[in-house]
Amino acid sequence: MSDIRMGLLFSRIRMEEKLLIEAAKKRGIEFVMVDSREVIFDLDSKFEYDVLLERDVSHSRALYALNLFENSGVKAINSYPVALTCGDKVATSKALRDAGVPTPDVKVAFTKESALEAIEQMGYPVVLKPVTGSWGRLMAKINDRDAAEAVLEHKDHLGSYYHKIFYMQEFINKPERDIRAFVFGDDVICAIYRSSKHWITNTARGATASNCPLTPELKQICLDAAAAVGKGILAVDLIESENEVMVHEVNYTVEFRNSIDTTGVNIPDKMLDYALEVGGNG
């Protein structure tokens, strides 16, 4: 039984949270459940737990909560700076490029006219992604100028200002799969292939998962990517191009339900191990 008190920040109990709660109970770890829909902070809030696991499905709520928790002395996984970087595709791509991690070329523009010019410079096809979001939502593969004009016009009239930040990523002709690797601190614990005939290979969009062997090369690029964004409990998404393996995203609120049986790795236990290590330091 651990004497470290652990908070769990959530807004919806998904399968991942159920598995974490079950694993914690088996190990005698006390979870303090923190529902972001109900929690109230003041600027002098103090909390009686040693480490916080952030599992909120809302990126904006997670950011504010992490900032307030960490400035009240709580160690958080993942930290506010990591969430700030990984929750923004522009920030993630810049961090990867600055660290020398292979990553697809990206252009960023702030008007539909300059975005169209950027796409023309990159050449077709190109992938247009929202700067925030997950599960492959609102992504578009732009194959020609007509499609570019139509999609950019549509995004320009959507409500959120985030849609006015146009993030264009080089399209990589991958072998009907990508790779998701799980990096906890300085350890790459496992990886899966996500396979689909569709160009979007998220399991949330129907891709199938299978075990991916951890080669020394794969481990190193994953560790480099995790270090570039600040380390923590991370899912590194990689694409196999014709010439190299490239990192295209790093995710900070890790989903793992499809990867436990696939890899044979007890991911919830590994997550708790890492949280206990962080909570016990200092």
Image (cartoon, rainbow, N blue to C red):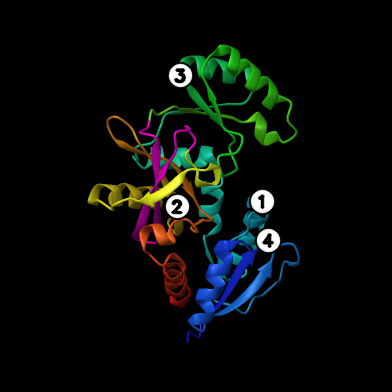
Residue annotated with mark 4: 11
What residue do we see at 36% from left, 53% from top? 191
Q: Quadrant of the C terminus?
A: bottom left
Q: Residue at label 1?
A: 60
Graded by Cα atoms within 10 Å as few (under 14), some (14 to 19) or many (20 or more), the crowding at tag 1 reads few
Labels 4 and 2 touching (C-beta < 8 A)? no
Q: CA distance from mark 2 to mark 3?
A: 28 Å
Residue at image position (62%, 69%) is 72
Residue at (52% x, 56% y) in the render: 255
Q: Rate crowding at label 4 as few (under 14), some (14 to 19) or many (20 or more) other CA atoms within 10 Å.
A: some
- Image depth: mark 2 or mark 1 in front: 2
Q: Which residue is mark 2?
A: 235
Q: Earlier in the sequence, mark 2 or mark 1?
A: 1
Main SS type for the magenta part? strand
Nearer to me, 150 or 107:
150
- The amino acid at mark 3 is Met
Residue 138 position within the rendered picture, expressed as x and y whole percent measured from the top left: 61, 34
Of the numbered discs 4 and 3, the one sitting upstream in the chain is 4
Q: Which residue is mark 3?
A: 122
> In the displayed image of the protein, which residue is found farthest to the left?
216
Res 234 seen here: yes
Q: Secondary structure at mark 3?
A: helix
Q: Position of residue 136 (x, y in %)?
A: 55, 39
Q: Residues within 10 Å of mark 2 (few under 14, many from 20)?
A: many
Residue farthest top in this picture = 146
- Please give the range of residues in magenta: 174-200
Q: Is residue 50 above or below residue 121?
A: below
- Rendered location of residue 20, percent (x, y): 53, 70
Callout 2: SS? strand
Q: Residue flagged by tag 4: what amino acid is it?
A: Ser
The residues bearing labels 1 and 3 have C-alpha atoms spaced at a distance of: 31 Å
Residue type (three-letter) at the residue carrying disc 1:
Ser
